[in-house]
Image: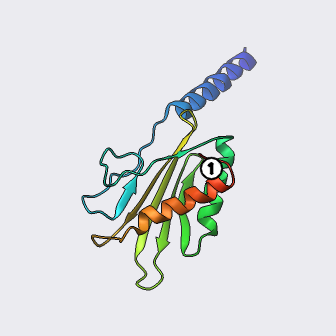
Amino acid sequence: MKVSYLLLIILMTASTSSQAYATSKKSLPACPDSPNCVSSQTQDTDHYIAPFEIIGDPHKAWSALRNAVIGKGRMVIVHETPDSLAAEATSLVFRFIDDIDAILDIDARIIHIRSASRIGYSDLGVNRRRMEILRAELQKARLIK
């Protein structure tokens, strides 16, 4: 009796945790009204940037994105989970900090991305270029479209 009860608890826990992971839909922070932010989860055309469309193994694409962020100078991951990461990028001269966020959506086979300046109004396109540089690296590795 004890063994079957324990087995039932284990199966329920495994089933519940896998369902929660599969159905969790995370979202990126919204962009402010200023033009110094891009996000793949906005409907606003001025701030919109296409998500990374995964070609092969989503876990390989996610790992490659993580490594690309780590490999950049002045960029550091400050928080991560198996399907999300938050990083900070520090500008060279004035030491401004920009926030970078990414969410892996395995079911949709995409990585949602966001890059935003913490202060100021215009970023002269820095956040969009940063995301496009990461996109180019993953495209070169043939992990995203």
| Quadrant (top left, top right, bottom left, bottom right) of the N terminus | top right
| Quadrant (top left, top right, bottom left, bottom right) of the C terminus | top right
Apparent side of residue 93 relative to residue 67 in the rendered image (left or right)? left
**Percent x, y of residue 53:** 55, 43
Asked whether 26 or 124 is in front, the reply is 124
Residue lying furthest top in this view? Answer: 1
Q: Write the residue at 48% across / 82% down.
A: 92
- Where does label 1 land, which residue? 62
Apparent side of residue 108 relative to residue 115 in the rendered image (left or right)? right
Residue lying furthest bottom in this view? Answer: 93
Tell me how the rendering is colored: rainbow
Position of residue 39 relative to residue 6, above or below, is: below
Q: Secondary structure at mark 1?
A: helix
Position of residue 103 relative to residue 75, above or below, is: above
Q: Write the residue at 42% across / 48% down.
A: 40
Asked whether 27 or 48 is in front, the reply is 48
